[in-house]
Every structure is written in C-alpha cells, then in structure tokens.
Amino acid sequence: MFMKGLVLDTTVKRAYVAAFDGAKESVYYFDESLSTQSELIPACEAVLSEVGMTPSDLDGVAAVVGPGSFTGIRIGVAFANALAYALSVPRFSLTSFEVMRVARPDAPCYMIDAGHDSAYAARIVVGSLVQENLEKKDLPIGTVDQNDILDLLPASALVATRKAFEERAYSACVVTKECIYLKPNYMRKSQAERMKDNRA
C-alpha cells in the first residue's frame, strides 16, 4: 500500500513543508524574508505538485507541534488541523525532539535554544524522550543542538511521518501519534501569559 502524506514544520527558523507519495518526496523551504503565514499555502501547493498530488490525494497530514517558535507553532498546528478537517484525513503529531532523534538517534539529549541561557530539552530515559526546561550549563555532554542539524530535519520528519502512517495502516495494536486535533507543545507559557499571571 502506498501512502501519500504532507508534513509541515513551522517551528524552526528555516521552516519547511514536505510531501511524499510512495518513494517520491519533495521538500520546500520557506523564504526567510516572507512570513510563514503568507507562504504556507503556496509551499504546500508546491510540494504536492512536485510529487504529482493534489490535497484530495492525501492519506494524512502531519505537523511538528514544537517546542520552537510560539508564532510558528500556532500557525502550523492551526493550518494542519484545518486542512485535515477539510479533507477528512487523520492528523499526526511530531515533536521537534522526535524529529531530531531520527536525525541523531544515539544522542543522550536534544536541545532547542529557549533564550536567557536556557533550553528546551529532551533527555533519553530508559529509551524514551523526557522533556524538561534546563539551563544550558546543565545539559549533558553529547547533547544535540537543533541549530546544528537544521539541514537534516526535513528528511527526518519524512521518516517519522512515514512510520506513523505505516503503523496506523498495518498494526491495529500499535499506539501511534495520530490525533483528533493537534495540540501545540510550547513547554512554557508565552510572555503574554506570564505577564497576565504576574498581574493576577
């Protein structure tokens, strides 16, 4: 059975959209001079056209839900939810750390710069990813920084998405990342939320 899917990651500085149809794949990087919101629909059209598909051909939609850019997460998750709803196809959720782990499976920890010498991190504990906010000085030796593997992320996201699609199609017993609605993975409150809490 050939699977046809779309995956988008608007959480990183170099946002991208990728599509696959069987062995065919296409990746589109957003123009950093344009807004993610304005470029999202043209990007999806471009990758789908490259592999000879239209939205109605899709078997599912996947999105990287964070952590990462607050605005990017909101745009990507909302768009993926709306597209999947309109097409009546399943949604699949990938965290930024899960995508990084595909790229560097032997690392003890993965990190995303959270500013102020802190990091969003995910350590490997008994084979599983455990998310936490850490000071950069507390990151273990061998931690992979997302900024160092940006070029590897689209291919890794495609691998992770294909696996999620295959699990759903071939094994009713396997827990997948399929979701009714994708939810953002912020890992901490936004600045606006923190200011609101401080006023309360």
Image (cartoon, rainbow, N blue to C red):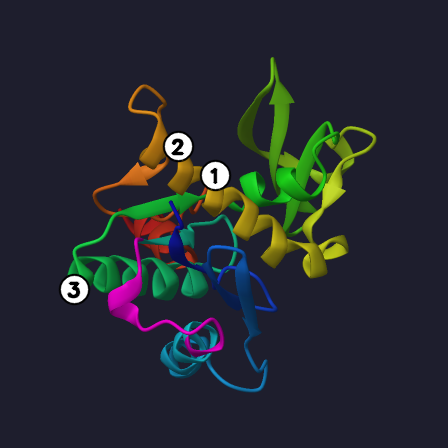
As measured in the structure, the alpha-carbon distance from the residue carrying label 1 to the one carrying label 2 is 6 Å
* Other-residue count near label 1 (Cα within 10 Å), few / some / many at <14 / 14–19 / ≥20: some
Residue 176 visible in the snapshot: no
The answer to whether mark 3 and mark 1 are in CB contact below 8 A is no
- Residue underneath mark 1: 163
- Residue at 57% over, 82% down: 31
Q: Is residue 88 left or right of residue 120?
A: left
Helix, strand or loop at label 1? It is: helix
Residue 110 higher or lower than 106, as above or below = below
Quadrant containing the N terminus is top left
Q: Between residue 149 and residue 166, name the one nearer to us.
A: 166
- Residue underneath mark 2: 167
The tag earlier along the polypeptide, 3 or 2, is: 3
As measured in the structure, the alpha-carbon distance from the residue carrying label 3 to the one carrying label 1 is 23 Å
Helix, strand or loop at label 2? It is: helix
Q: Between residue 135 and residue 53, name the one nearer to us.
A: 53
Residue 55 lies in what quarter of the image?
A: bottom left
Give the residue furthest to the right. Answer: 141
Report x, y in % for residue 121.
Answer: 61, 37
Helix, strand or loop at label 3? It is: helix
| Residues drawn in magenta | 49-59
Mark 3 is on which residue type? Ala
Residue 6 visible in the snapshot: yes
The tag earlier along the polypeptide, 3 or 1, is: 3
The answer to whether mark 1 and mark 2 are in CB contact below 8 A is yes
Q: Is residue 163 left or right of residue 57?
A: right
* Other-residue count near label 3 (Cα within 10 Å), few / some / many at <14 / 14–19 / ≥20: few
Q: Which mark is residue 86?
A: 3
Mark 2 is on which residue type? Glu
